[in-house]
Image: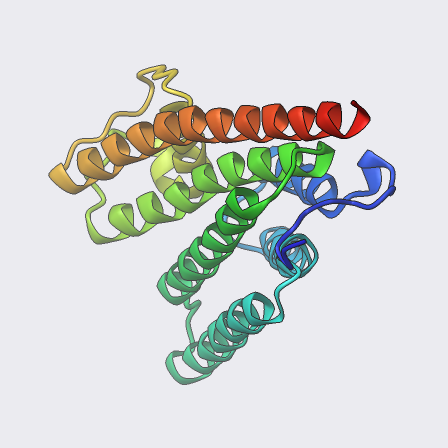
Amino acid sequence: MSNLSIEIAGMPWYRGPAFILLVVLVSVYAVSAFIGSDGLGAHLISALLWVSLLVGVRKITQSPKALKITLGIVIVGIAGQVLIQRLAERPAYLWHTWASLIFLSAVLVFLVWAVFKAERVDADTVFAATAVFLLLGIVCAYAFMLVHAADPGAFSLTERDMADPAPALLHYSFTTLTTVGYGSISPMSKLARMISDLEAVIAQLYLAVILARLVSLQIEHSRKTDGGES
């Protein structure tokens, strides 16, 4: 059995690491819709997300190297934010956004690796694959925040959203991810359009590929089981 297997070895499905991580991701998304991108509440939500992802990476991938890399990004991100705030005496918004984007992207890569290295389908495999999909939406939301910071006219945000664009861009990211396209927010700059197109295409390709992967694993496992019984 590969050390990247995400079997839960008899553990109830609702106690598996991938299911717990999925619950955290959904909870963070739901709560973030009602709080701003700054303040104590936002920092607590961010801390909860980072800690949960660190634990999730270690438990799901069973890879100490993955934990070391992601933990190193967290340490550098926190140290850089504290240093900037003390030297510049202002919130390190851009630094925090860049650090979050890099950290979440690393977690995303490791989780995708774990899902595709799984040797059989179980509940935790499905939950991990779902967590990857949600995490892709969050990663793209941070990318959109950086685009907006560089060009405030990159998205057609309302005056209310311009005051705190993070929740609106998170909403836009998930409507793009699922190809719903409400039209309430539109990409205006070339970079914003390019990232939006990439998110939509990658999301659809991921769903097609991961579905084929899981189905093939299940068929292979069923054949081995039937062959063993006969």
Q: Nearer the viewer, residue 24 or 94?
A: 24
Q: Does 96 sit left or right of 218 as displayed? A: left
Name the image quarter holding residue 171.
top left
Residue at the far front: name it: 230
Residue nearer the viewer, 85 or 228: 228
Residue 213 screen position, x and y as percent: 50, 31
Front position in the image: 102 or 40: 102
In percent of width and height, residue 152 lies at 23, 44
State how many labels appear: 0
Quadrant that contains the C terminus: top right
222 up-or-down from 114: above or below: above
Q: Report which quarter residue 186 is drawn in.
A: top left
Residue 111: x %, y % from top left: 54, 49
Residue 137 sits above or below residue 174 on the image: below
Residue 19 left/right relative to 153: right
Above or below — where is 131 with respect to 70? above
| Residue occupying the point 39% across, 15% down | 180
Q: How is the image coloured?
A: rainbow
Residue located 58% across and 41% down the image: 35
Q: Is residue 34 visible?
A: no
Q: With 175 as the anchor, is 157 left or right in this view?
A: left
Q: Does the image show residue 124?
A: yes
Q: Is residue 108 above or below residue 103?
A: above
Percent x, y for residue 212? 47, 25
Identified at 51% across, 42% down, the residue is 135
